[in-house]
């Protein structure tokens, strides 16, 4: 090091890409200072004077490191007293360590480079298509390629921004494309026009490609004033295509990546059109061959249809629009939402100063309501005359985007004219009450699950009480309807029979608008728990899908009711979530124990009758819990008049005297694999925790890797030829303890069973574990059909429904209740719909039926084990096994 640094150097800046809290400098900085100091003290230094060494931090949390920042460091060194321990890339307005930099400064490294940006949506295929573009140009031309892809942890539904560079010379720009630099900008989602200032990135003469359903001669009038100004001033070439229409026509659903990629090659001219199309088709075949020939052919057809449906827009000479970009959130939103969350949602989070962020890391709940993603092309419309008020549609909705509510008809006097409501059906409700099923148009993702589950079908024309219709003419109308729906008071939950589906779904969900994949099979379970227990719920969440859609900033779906009560959620590491949740329970119980001790000491001061009532209540029902809250409120009022240390301490602990519902939530990768040891320990303790395992039979969040929950024969990453061993029976392991409530559910196969299992499990005073079947995009089929698949999973014996309740054993009854029938459908009927089983299906087709018989027998044997437990109890089975072993 000392031999390389020029001997006349007077100032040195050392940059570390890390932070050492509590240290007097970062590692590399201290290494340099130490080396120079030791050289001087040892008399071996080449320097004539001791150089001034300053240290700085850069690039933390994926912050950019641009030429402008490097220049800023050198400018700082030129000062007589350069700042030490500085930061670059952030605005530190608290400790003032940051350096200012010029965002637009660039070196000549960008000369001769073609720069392209693509604004896409997670799971629409944009990122994958751009990676293929780099491969095609890298292989078919002499160009060098570079790609940076900006997206968050969500698997689907979030913005993705691709930054591509191409050059005949090696590219030396390890940073994102900046303002006024892009030669090509593709907007693959029209809703992004209202969210991102994407043409700020366009250089003069750039090309702008927009995916929009608007006709070429109508689209100009839909642009904001600023967009029109930029297109005219920068002389931007403007092209449009209705990619979603082509995707629907060719059977590609919402995948528009191949269509937009074809547009790019057609416009850019980087390859001859015929060559480009041939290469795109080859790339599509390579990417999707594993999903079957039909998918490949759909992509080919979409490519052929694209060129004829792409149009150049004639740009007028002057601006005609008066439209302004809408505010990301309304003015009525809380200050933190307006100044912090909205900035992050708009892609400007990197510009927030340090002072804007919470110093303790806590984040307000209920912020997902402000993130109106507008993903749906179609939304469900309710036929109130046909509806039977079964409650199935809000039960299956993955995003809490369709709601039901009960209210007095008189409350609708000021309702919008299109707000639908009708007198509720059923003997469990007072006469004259009305009900409404209302969709949140900007939060609906168009997954169609509510329509597919709807049992109310017209005998005249076959339409259902819910039907999907295009959103464009309905968005504004239904937005007002949903706002009015939310303004209606929540119906008194004490008057609802929450073990009945239609009534349970009238409860307010305290988990709303999660950013999960369209049609996610996990979120409905969490929403259900939040409706039933959310006002007293604490969630320990394992890293995975549930931590991404459940709390990946900037928004959080867990929310509060009007009383300010709602789930409190914190994410743990992957491997220790069960222990993390157990810590919740232990600390809550300890606080409650301490509060009880204090209350016993203060009986005379607060009143023996009130104190005894608080201490002796069992809180076994929701009515008991609400009564306890009333008593605690009375206690707090009395404590206000007592000026002692004990009274103040009891005031701070009083809420712990109300029952808390602790939930430990995670996926099968956590429960079956990495966190299994902790889970096993937690259920062994006998503590009152509720464990919800969202079993998708694969590591969903990380891209579909095999877990111990993956069934035999299923294809997954690390099991490309199909898994050779069977699925771990987590339920049997838990049942073997004897004191654990254990259940398996599948909400699409038996919804009332799922509802009542959740109620039963939570009421058990001990460990409970619910293993919930979760259809997932990694299974490879259209998730709008997941209810049918769940039914097949149960009918084939792939997934059993049962409840093991230790309380029944204490009553002299069999604790096991097997709630699914014997396998009645061949396993082949289940697996043929899921591409993850295509290898197994092919083997079944080739061996004359022997393999199918083998699998059917395996499932029947598995069912027989549980059937035997349900007939005679697991203790008798163990006894028989022991007798057999002894003989």
Image (cartoon, helix red, strand yellow):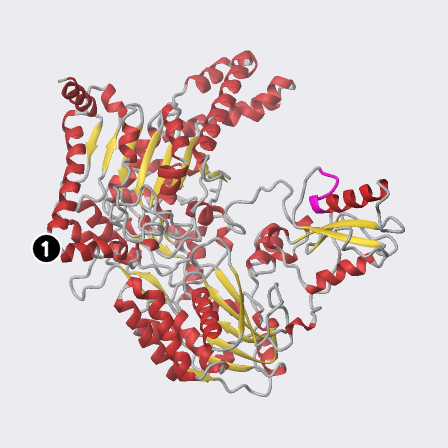
Residue 607: x and y in percent read 52, 15
Whether 780 is drawn above or below 262: the answer is above
Q: Residue at x 27, y 36 (%)?
A: 729
Asked if the stretch drawn in magenta spans residue 522, the answer is no
Is 759 left or right of 427, judged from the image as shown? right
Q: Which of 719 and 707 is in front in this view?
A: 719
Is 643 left or right of 673, judged from the image as shown? right
Check disc 1 and report the residue beneath it: 848
Q: Is residue 633 visible?
A: no
Near mark 1 (Cα within 10 A), the count class, few <14, some 14-19 or many ≥20, is few
Highlighted range, magenta? 23-28
Whether 269 is drawn above or below 370: the answer is below
Q: Nearer the viewer, residue 372 or 273?
A: 273
Q: Which of 359 and 25 is in front in this view?
A: 25
Is 432 left or right of 542, judged from the image as shown? left
**Chief secondary structure of the magenta portion:** loop
Residue 579: x and y in percent read 45, 30
Residue 665 location, quadrant: top left
Residue 604: x and y in percent read 55, 11
Q: Please, what secondary structure does the residue beneath circle 1 have? A: loop
């Amino acid at each position: 090091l000392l031999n390389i640094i020029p001997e006349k150097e007077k100032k040195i800046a050392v940059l570390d890409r890390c932070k050492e809290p509590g240290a007097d400098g970062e590692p590399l900085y201290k290494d340099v200072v130490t080396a120079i100091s030791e050289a001087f003290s040892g008399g071996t230094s080449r320097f004539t004077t001791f150089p001034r060494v300053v240290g700085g931090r850069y690039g933390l949390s994926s912050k950019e490191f641009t030429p402008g920042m490097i220049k800023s460091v050198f400018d700082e060194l030129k000062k007589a007293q350069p700042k030490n321990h500085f930061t670059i890339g952030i605005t530190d307005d608290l400790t003032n360590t940051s350096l200012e930099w010029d965002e637009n400064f660039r070196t000549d490294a960008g000369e001769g480079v073609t720069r392209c940006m693509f604004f896409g949506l997670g799971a629409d295929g944009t990122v994958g298509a751009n990676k293929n573009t780099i491969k095609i140009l890298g292989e078919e031309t002499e160009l060098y390629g570079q790609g940076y892809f900006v997206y968050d942890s969500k698997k689907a539904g979030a913005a993705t921004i691709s930054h591509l560079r191409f050059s005949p010379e090696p590219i030396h720009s390890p940073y994102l494309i900046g303002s006024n630099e892009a030669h090509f900008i593709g907007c693959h989602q029209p809703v992004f026009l209202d969210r991102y200032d994407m043409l700020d990135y366009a250089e003069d003469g750039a090309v702008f490609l927009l995916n929009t359903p608007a006709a070429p001669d109508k689209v100009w009038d839909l642009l904001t004033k600023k967009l029109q100004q930029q297109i005219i001033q920068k002389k931007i070439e403007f092209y449009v295509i209705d990619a979603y229409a082509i995707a629907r026509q060719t059977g590609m659903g919402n995948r528009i990546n191949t269509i937009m990629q074809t547009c790019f090659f057609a416009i850019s001219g980087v390859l001859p059109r015929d060559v480009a199309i041939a290469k795109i088709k080859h790339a599509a075949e390579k990417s999707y061959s594993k999903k079957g020939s039909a998918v490949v052919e759909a992509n080919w057809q979409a490519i052929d249809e694209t060129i004829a449906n792409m149009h150049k827009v004639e740009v007028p000479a002057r601006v005609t629009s008066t439209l302004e970009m809408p505010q990301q959130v309304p003015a009525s939103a809380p200050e933190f939402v307006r100044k912090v969350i909205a900035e992050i949602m708009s892609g400007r989070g990197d510009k927030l100063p340090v002072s804007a962020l919470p110093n303790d890391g806590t984040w307000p709940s209920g912020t997902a309501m402000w993130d109106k993603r507008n993903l749906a092309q179609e939304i469900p419309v309710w036929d109130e005359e046909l509806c039977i008020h079964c409650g199935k549609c809000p039960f299956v909705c993955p995003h809490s985007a369709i709601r039901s509510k009960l209210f007095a008809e008189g409350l609708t006097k000021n309702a919008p004219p299109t707000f639908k409501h009708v007198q509720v059906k059923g003997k469990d409700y007072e006469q004259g009450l009305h009900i409404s099923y209302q969709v949140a148009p900007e939060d609906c993702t168009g997954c169609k699950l509510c329509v597919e589950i709807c049992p109310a079908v017209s005998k005249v024309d076959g339409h259902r009480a819910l039907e999907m219709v295009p959103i464009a003419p309905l968005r504004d109308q239904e937005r007002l309807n949903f706002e009015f729906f939310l303004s209606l008071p929540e119906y008194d939950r004490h008057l609802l029979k929450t073990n009945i589906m239609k009534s349970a779904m009238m409860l307010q969900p305290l988990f709303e608008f999660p950013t999960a994949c369209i049609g996610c099979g996990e979120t409905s379970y969490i929403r259900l728990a939040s409706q039933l227990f959310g006002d007293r719920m604490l969630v320990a969440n394992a890293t995975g899908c549930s931590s991404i859609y459940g709390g990946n900033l900037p928004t959080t779906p867990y929310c509060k009711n009007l009383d300010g009560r709602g789930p409190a959620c914190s994410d743990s590491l992957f491997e220790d979530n069960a222990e993390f949740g157990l810590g919740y329970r232990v600390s809550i119980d300890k606080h409650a124990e301490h509060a009880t001790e204090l209350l016993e000491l203060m009986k005379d001061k607060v009143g023996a009758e009130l104190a005894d009532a608080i201490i002796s209540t069992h809180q076994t029902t929701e009515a008991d819990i609400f009564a306890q809250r009333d008593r605690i409120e009375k206690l707090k009022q009395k404590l206000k008049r007592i000026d002692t240390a004990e009274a103040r301490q009891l005031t701070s602990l009083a809420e712990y005297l109300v029952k808390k519902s602790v939930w430990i939530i995670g996926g099968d990768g956590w429960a079956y694999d990495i966190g299994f040891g902790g889970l096993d320990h937690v259920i062994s303790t006998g503590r009152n925790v509720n464990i919800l395992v969202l079993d998708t039979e694969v590591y969903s969040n990380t891209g579909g890797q095999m877990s111990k929950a993956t069934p035999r024969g299923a294809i997954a990453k690390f099991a490309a030829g199909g898994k050779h061993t069977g699925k771990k029976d987590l339920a049997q392991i838990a049942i073997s303890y004897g004191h654990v409530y254990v259940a398996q559910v599948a909400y699409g196969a038996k919804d009332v069973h799922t509802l009542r299992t959740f109620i039963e499990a939570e009421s058990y005073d001990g460990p409970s574990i619910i293993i919930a079947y979760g259809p997932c995009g990694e299974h490879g089929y259209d998730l709008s059909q997941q209810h049918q698949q769940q039914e097949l999973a149960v009918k084939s014996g792939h997934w059993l429904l049962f409840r093991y309740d230790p309380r029944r054993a204490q009553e002299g009854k069999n604790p096991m209740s097997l709630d699914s029938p014997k396998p009645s459908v061949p396993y082949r009927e289940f697996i043929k719909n899921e591409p993850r089983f295509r290898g197994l299906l092919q083997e079944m087709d080739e061996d004359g039926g022997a393999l199918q018989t083998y699998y059917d027998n395996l499932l029947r044997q598995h069912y027989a084990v549980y059937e035997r437990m349900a007939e005679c109890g697991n203790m008798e089975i163990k006894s028989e096994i022991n007798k057999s072993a002894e003989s």
